[in-house]
Amino acid sequence: MAHRSKSSTDGTASNVRAPKRRQLISAVSTLLLLPVIPRVAMAAKLLAVRTWPADEYTRVTLELDSELKAEHFTLESPHRMVVDIQGLDMSPALNDLVRKVRTDDPYISSLRVAQNRPNIVRLVFDLKQAIAPQVFTLKPVGDYKFRLVLDLYPKAMQDPLTALLKKSPQKNDDDPLARVLEDIGRNPQGTGMASMPVIPERVVPTIAPPASGIESPDTAQQRLGRNKRVVTIALDPGHGGEDPGAIGKGGTREKDVVLAIALKLKARIDATPGMRAYLTRDGDYFVPLHVRVEKARRVKADLFVSIHADAFVRPTAGGSSVYVLSQSGASSTAARWLADKENAADLIGGINLNVQNKQVAQIMLDMSTSAQIKDSRLLADTMLSQLKNVYRLHKPQTEQAAFAVLKAPDMPSILVETAFISNPDEERMLRSGTDQEKFAQALHGGIRQFFKANPHLAMAN
């Protein structure tokens, strides 16, 4: 009975579901007979276009609301670069890009833009010289959305050491860098950074120990100037180009004020006998962190001074700070936070990870020696003693954290936060040419005092 009852119940349910299945099949058949209308692909929206011309390379950036693919190739006679961007239509912003090409751009003569095919825009760059382009995309980071980056590098890149000696205001036949430049002249094929000959060790000059008693900085510099040895100071203005750094309430950009201070400091150093300065960037363009370190090493710098303007969530925070590299964690939570922020510069500025030179990238993995950090602390302490003479200190002692830009294993390296750009009063001060000069004066005094107190470090390396 139970089995028959169950069978009878199943049959009834089956009879009820059968009409529903027939209705569903009929509806599907009707849908299959409808015409298929292809979905039109939506073109990406171009949010902004930017150009960053510089002697080292020119960068062109297109910021979009979605990631795009691009293909490129170069032509000769005359030199041109063609870029086909997929998923993009003509827009007023592209015409704006044409207008952004400057007449003094070292690489781009002119730019033409047109709709090459449906959903494909073609850019044609008329070039002033042969280039080795890098074209890559960046994911959203910071205030930026998706970016398509076109970096136009010269095919024959000038080595930083060569550029330094050409611009050096001082002539010195016994300068080891000058001897390298002569070697380059005899071996022209070795002018690129990758093919540069090994820089010989410096000639160690004879420097008489300071006389007993207190020696004035001027006397120390005169003594240093009489030596055949030229001390090279690498100045590193933070951020640049796509990476503005911190921005104050009044719109002041960190990258602008630190470059202004660095240029003023360079003028002071170049006017000092026995010293010269080298800038890791001398204009508004982006330089990756590892390239900043590599440049300083290529010119055999004796010191590395990275210049920044601090920022914090509280607008009342203020004062100057000096940092060195740490091998065992940050000296404070604030120092660790600052290091993380500064180390993010590569993400914001944008680097092409696909073409990283393994040998150069390895520099960022090499931890500095304990001796280098010890010398860096000496330099940092001296800088603090000078900075407090022109402005107040945020903290009276040297701070430590894992700053990537300080990982040069063969030179004392410090990072100076001149003032807080997030503090309205200090933002106004950072914009002032007079106050910028005061910071340059303090940093210059710190460098001079450091070599006065540690003359053996002027002979090192």
Image (cartoon, helix red, strand yellow):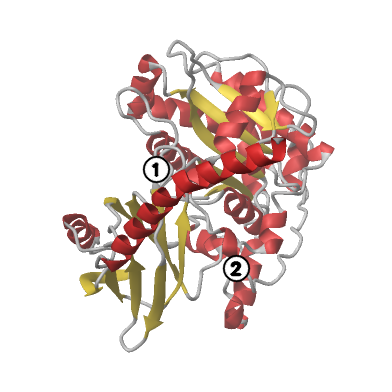
Viewer-proximal residue among 452 and 419: 419
5 horizontally vs 264: left or right: right
Element under label 1?
A: loop
Q: In the rendered structure, which amino acid carries the disc numbered 2?
A: Met
Toward the right, the furthest residue is 370
Rendered location of residue 109, percent (x, y):
26, 71
**Quadrant location of the N terminus?**
top right
Residue at 24 percent of width and 68 percent of height: 35
Residue 245 figure quarter: top left
**Which label sits in the foreground, 2 or 1?**
1
- Is residue 323 at all visible to an observer of this figure? yes
77 to 139, vertically: above or below: below
Residue 430 disc label = none
Give the residue number, with chain letter if any, for mark 1: 144
| Mark 2 → mark 1, Cα distance in angstroms | 31 Å
The picture quadrant where one finds residue 32 is bottom left
Is residue 216 at least partly visible in the picture? no
Q: Is residue 150 left or right of residue 93?
A: right
- Count all numbered tags in the image, as a single digit: 2
Tag 1 or tag 2, which sits nearer the N-term? 1
Q: From what the image shows, is residue 291 above or below residue 407?
A: below
The residue drawn where x is 32% and y is 75% is: 128
Circle 1 packing at 10 Å, graded few (<14), some (14-19), many (20+), is some
- In this rendering, is residue 277 above or below 135? above
Residue drawn at x 51%, y 70% as measured from the top left: 157
> What residue do we see at 34% from left, 49% from top?
65
Residue ID for mark 2: 193
93 vs 426, left or right, is: left
